[in-house]
Image (cartoon, helix red, strand yellow):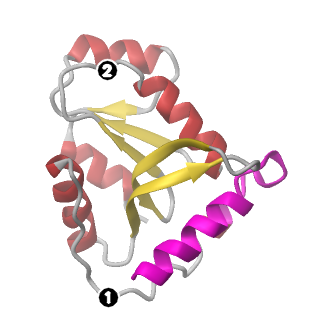
């Protein structure tokens, strides 16, 4: 598992530059498809619970949690709360959406994958504002689980 995450981090560095933007085919590859059901942990219980729920519904779909995302120069730009084969999930546990749109934009730029914000405790007005600003966000876990399935 550690070797997989280390390999993934190296690949993220090499695949995050402008020359690989839109390289979502890589993230849909069999990298995680051969994995057996796993259990994820995180300092944020919401991240761990969601990742484990996704893993139980779609085994192998979760590539990792709290994965550092780096630009082509190797600089840390953000982290993927949950990295999936076909998207990045940025999870907000609290009631503030501060910084979420920027985090979504950075995740997309670093991976070439669509990024989805999930904030079950965010007010409807915050979700609506983020959506109007171009963010793909939801506070509805069931909707999220339907959207991310491969």
Residue at image point 65% right, 68% down: 11
Residue 56: image x %, image y %? 21, 73
Disc marking residue 21 = none
Q: Which residue is mark 2?
A: 97
Residue 5 located within the stretch drawn in magenta: yes
**Image quadrant in which you'd find residue 106:** top right
Residue 11 located within the stretch drawn in magenta: yes
Q: CA distance from mark 2 to mark 1?
A: 34 Å
Residue 49: image x %, image y %? 16, 57
The region drawn magenta spans 1-25
Residue at image point 52% right, 22% down: 134
**Image quadrant in which you'd find residue 100:** top left
Residue 23: image x %, image y %? 71, 58
Of helix, strand and loop, which mostly describes the magenta segment? helix
Residue at image point 24% right, 68% down: 40
| Residue found at the far right of this picture | 19
Q: Residues within 10 Å of mark 1 (few under 14, many from 20)?
A: few
> In this view of the protein, which residue sits in the foreground, 67 or 126?
67
- Left-right relation of 72 to 53: right
- Left-right relation of 7 to 50: right
Count of marks, rendered view: 2
| Figure quadrant of the N terminus | bottom left
Residue 29: image x %, image y %? 59, 75
Disc marking residue 36 = 1
SS at mark 1?
A: loop
Does 96 sit above or below residue 16? above
């Amino acid at each position: 598992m550690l070797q997989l995450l280390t390999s993934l981090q190296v690949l993220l560095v090499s695949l995050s530059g402008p020359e690989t933007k839109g390289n979502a085919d890589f993230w849909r590859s069999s990298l995680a498809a051969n994995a057996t059901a796993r259990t994820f942990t995180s300092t944020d219980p919401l991240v761990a619970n969601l990742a484990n729920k996704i893993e139980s519904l779609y085994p192998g779909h979760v590539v990792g949690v709290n994965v550092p995302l780096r630009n082509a120069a190797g600089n840390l730009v953000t982290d993927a709360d949950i990295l999936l084969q076909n998207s990045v999930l940025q999870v907000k546990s609290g009631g503030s959406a501060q910084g979420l749109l920027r985090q979504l934009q950075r995740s997309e730029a670093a991976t070439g994958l669509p990024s989805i914000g999930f904030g079950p405790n965010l007010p409807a007005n915050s979700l609506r504002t983020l959506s109007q600003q171009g963010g793909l966000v939801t506070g509805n876990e069931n909707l999220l689980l339907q959207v991310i399935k491969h």
